[in-house]
Every structure is written in C-alpha cells, then in structure tokens.
C-alpha cells in the first residue's frame, strides 16, 4: 500500500480555507451550544462508527494507540457537548458506559484481526462518517492557537508586561511543546485513523503543524478582526 508522503494534501488545503475564512466568519465554537454543538454530537457518532470499519480494498493494520487516543478525545468532546446542551444525566451516563463496552469490542476486533476490521465499507462512505469530526477537532485546535496569539484574549502568550524574556519563553513553551502535543491528539491521531494512507513520517507532520499554525494565526489575527461585529457600547 502506498503511503502518502506529500507534505500537504487536499485536506490541508480545505482545512486552511476553513480556518482562515469560514471559522472566523462563523464565530464561536462547536462547544458553545446550539446547532453547532448538535452537529458535533452527530459527527462524533459518525467517527465512532467509522472506527469499526475498514476501507474496502485499502485496509492495512491500524495502530491501537491511534484508536485509543482518537476515540478518547471523541468521548471527552461528546461529554462536553452533552453538558453544553443541558442533556439529562442518563445520556451522560450512557456516554460513560458505551465507550467502555464498545472499546472492549474494538479491542477484541483489533487483536483478532491483527489491527484490521471485521467490516469494510467503500472509501467514500468511511470518509463521510469520519471527516466531519476530524474537521471539528482541527477547528478546536485552531481556536486554541488563535486564543494564544490574540492580544485580546486572556490566554494570549504575548502578555509581556514589558519583559521580553518571559514572553519569549512562554511563546516557545506554548507553541514549541504544548501546541504540538495538542496537535498530535486533535489532528494527527484522528487523521491517521480515518485515512489509512496518511503518512507516519515526522517531517510531514512538522510541516503540517507549521501550516496549521500559520492558518490559525492568519484567521485569528487578520480575518476575524475584519469580520467581527463592532463592540456594543453602553448608551
């Protein structure tokens, strides 16, 4: 099976358009409640379904760590979304128990098939199921990066108080260590799980991380201020 070694793919271009243009215009986050949060729940369920399926004619062995990381993040976001829409406690309890049961089934499938799946689906169907949630995870990652670089945000890493040394250390620590770890959880793991052809080469993901960083910064610092509504002043 050929492994993608291209530094940027069509998905990276689509993601860039989303982060630079659509996300700032849309405003808010998928965890702000309302229709966007309901869409997150539907997309997360689709991602879970895709985890049980292999791509017909393209299936290769999958990493158990990718399954664990991706579905763990997925379960956490489902719980957060249920809180945001005010779901009853029984639904949150179901979200606690169901991943444990399904995780056992996935583990049995993974072990018995050597990292493959019992069921296979056409590539387009598996992508339709998986990619909406992958894009949501990318959006959440970009929102965090945007908050880090936005001077108006309380999470901004550029709150220097006139002291350049601590500011440089904070920027290096945040963008050189914390953000890459989050990128691995929110982007690398689910993308590699949802697409069996994705590269595992570190240099590929380093370039993609820098690309994601650039698009998130442009969206947060240039596009969003242009399209954001003016602040409402008290009479």
Image (tube, rainbow, N blue to C red):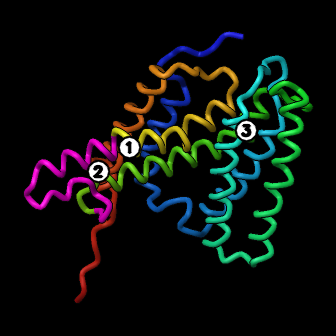
Where residue 119 sits, quadrant-wise, is top right
Residue 60 lies in quadrant: top right
Which residue matches tag 3?
A: 128
Q: Assign the N terminus to one quadrant of the image.
A: top right
**CB atoms at circles 2 and 3 under 8 Å apart?**
no
Q: Secondary structure at mark 3?
A: helix
> What residue is pinned by disc 1?
216
Q: Are the two marked residues, 1 and 3, in contact with CB atoms closer than 8 angstroms?
A: no
Residue visible at 60% across and 69% down in the picture: 34
Q: What residue sits 33% from the left and 42% below the top? A: 175
Instruction: Give the structural element (helix, strand or loop) at label 1.
Output: helix
Task: Tell me whether the residue at label 2 lies in contact with that at label 1, contact meaning CB atoms closer than 8 angstroms.
Answer: yes
Whole-number angstrom distance, CA of label 1 to CA of label 3? 24 Å
Assess disc 1: are there few (<14), some (14-19) or many (≥20) residues with their C-alpha within 10 Å of its C-alpha.
many
Q: Which residue is mark 2?
A: 149
The answer to whether 30 is drawn above or below residue 91 in the figure is: above
Does residue 40 lie above or below 112 as drawn?
A: below
SS of the residue at dot 2?
Answer: helix
Q: Quadrant of residue 92?
A: bottom right
Residue 32 position within the rendered picture, expressed as x and y whole percent measured from the top left: 53, 67
Mark 2, other Cα within 10 Å: few <14 / some 14–19 / many ≥20: many
Q: Quarter holding the C terminus?
A: bottom left
151 is higher (above) or lower (below) than 4:
below
Q: Residue 98 magenta-drawn?
A: no
First in sequence, mark 1 or 3: give its number.
3
Image side of residue 159 versus residue 50, left or right = left
């Amino acid at each position: 099976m050929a492994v993608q070694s291209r530094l940027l793919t069509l998905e990276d271009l689509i993601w860039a358009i989303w982060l630079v243009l659509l996300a700032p215009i849309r405003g808010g986050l998928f965890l702000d409640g309302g229709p966007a949060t309901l869409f997150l729940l539907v997309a997360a369920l689709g991602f879970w379904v895709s985890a049980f399926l292999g791509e017909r004619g393209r299936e290769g062995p999958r990493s158990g760590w990718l399954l664990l990381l991706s579905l763990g993040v997925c379960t956490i976001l489902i719980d957060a979304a249920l809180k945001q829409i005010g779901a009853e406690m029984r639904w949150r309890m179901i979200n606690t128990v169901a991943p444990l049961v399904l995780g056992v089934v996935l583990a049995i499938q993974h072990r018995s098939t050597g990292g493959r799946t019992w069921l296979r689906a056409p590539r387009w169907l598996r992508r339709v199921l998986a990619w909406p949630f992958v894009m949501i995870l990318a959006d959440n990652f970009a929102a965090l990066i945007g908050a880090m670089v936005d001077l108006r945000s309380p999470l901004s890493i550029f709150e220097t108080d006139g002291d350049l040394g601590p500011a440089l250390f904070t920027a290096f620590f945040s963008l050189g260590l914390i953000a890459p770890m989050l990128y691995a959880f929110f982007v690398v793991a689910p993308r590699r799980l949802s697409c069996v052809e994705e590269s595992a080469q570190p240099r590929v993901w380093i370039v993609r991380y820098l690309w994601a960083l650039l698009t998130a910064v442009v969206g947060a610092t240039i596009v969003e201020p242009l399209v954001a509504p003016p602040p409402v002043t008290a009479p």
